[in-house]
Amino acid sequence: MGFEGRTTRAAVMYGVNEPLIVEEIEIAEPGPGEVMVKLAASSVCHSDLHALDGGWPPQVPIVLGHEGAGTIEAVGPGVTRHAVGDPVSLSWTPGCERCRFCLVGRPNLCERMMATTGSNVMVDGTTRLRKGGQEIYTYMGTGSFSGYTVVPETGAIPIPAGSHLDVAAVVGCAVTTGFGAATKTARIAVGDTAVVIGLGGVGLSVIQGCVAQSAGMVIAVDVHEDKLATAKHFGATHVVNARETDVSAAVAELTGGRGADVAFEAIGLKATIEQTIGVLGPRGTAVLVGMPPSGVTFEADPTLVAMMELSIVGSNYGSANPPVDFPRILGLAQLGRLDLASLITRRIALEDINEAFEDMKRGEGIRTVVSHR
């Protein structure tokens, strides 16, 4: 492992609420148990915005981005599961394959990953990027807003041959988070009434997960009419514009007063988290999928929770086991059982990355994908 003259073009964050700077930086060769990935596509996620606007302030300088896909460019010593040229999707939960959570198929809760991803570093606590001798961090240990990145070998997930790499980039976080929340965290049962609040890439993937599980009524909630229309395309049976209608009253009317069996919050706001709990019927489950800025808390009436036997559960990365779930999801897409391509509403060059964040702040589009080709 070492810096031997290889460079990569990357979007670097130098400060909160400052535009990302697209520039050439140095990248080290992969070390033991690491791989270098040549990115074909990177997707822009709201978690990246949390870093940029200070909701989750990271160390700087740092290369943002944690959704990406490409091909293996080089492998480090001891790597046997990857070969140069293999197509992969990046996962920000590179399991250690030794802790109790990894051993039961829950690398999304890997004990090692919690330290390394949370600190935006590699397993050994260092980074593989620099500029002029200054260390540059990689967001969530991934740093996909770059032409090349180095990640642990378990953070590069082999994907089926023929997978579209722009779609595989979105599967790296948004799709897996949403689809998994419905199919793995909540385990939607046939005929369940589901409410999905927030219709970005995650919320729309929740809807596809509910449909895949043969949910009954699927009620989509947002404040943007275009996203409500898109939700119908993905299988929502009913839509509610929260800007114009009281959501709890609308759900009560649609369900004949019973309320939802399962409700998903896919934004990460105090108000919508509390709204999600409020639409539940007896023995209902609220699934908290959206990630709020640091310090956000919510309120719930414990008497109501107890009397109605409600459950409030968290969903981290859709309870995913990426080596199993990424290929499974992409396989369903190849069979036409999931529509992942329609989640991508804009494709841009890396130089236009700051525009993608402005679109996100305005609530425009679903997923923007950066093309590195």
Image: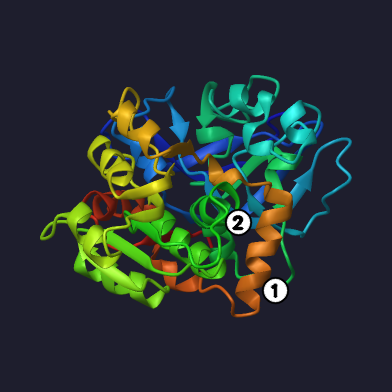
Q: Position of residue 280 (x, y in %)?
A: 34, 48
Q: Position of residue 3 (x, y in %)?
A: 68, 30
Amino acid type of disc 2? Ala
Q: Residues within 10 Å of mark 1 (few under 14, many from 20)?
A: few
Camera-nearest residue between 85 and 28: 85
Amino acid type of disc 1? Gly
> Vertical placement of 1 versus 250: above or below?
above
Q: Which numbered circle lies on residue 69?
A: 2
Q: Which numbered circle lies on residue 162?
A: 1
Q: Is residue 321 left or right of residue 372?
A: right
Residue that sits furthest to the bottom in the current view: 336
Q: Position of residue 146 (x, y in %)?
A: 52, 46
Q: Residues within 10 Å of mark 2 (few under 14, many from 20)?
A: many
Report the residue at 44% width, 64% height from top.
207
In the picture, which quadrant includes the C terminus? bottom right
> Vertical placement of 91 versus 324: above or below?
above
Sequence-wise, which precedes: disc 2 or disc 1?
2
Camera-nearest residue between 79 and 338: 338
> Vertical placement of 34 versus 357: above or below?
above
Secondary structure under badge 2? Answer: strand
Q: Position of residue 326 (x, y in %)?
A: 66, 57
Camera-nearest residue between 231 and 2: 231
Residue 349 appearing in the image: no
Residue that sits furthest to the front in the current view: 307
Report the residue at 41% width, 40% height from top.
47
Secondary structure under badge 1? Answer: loop
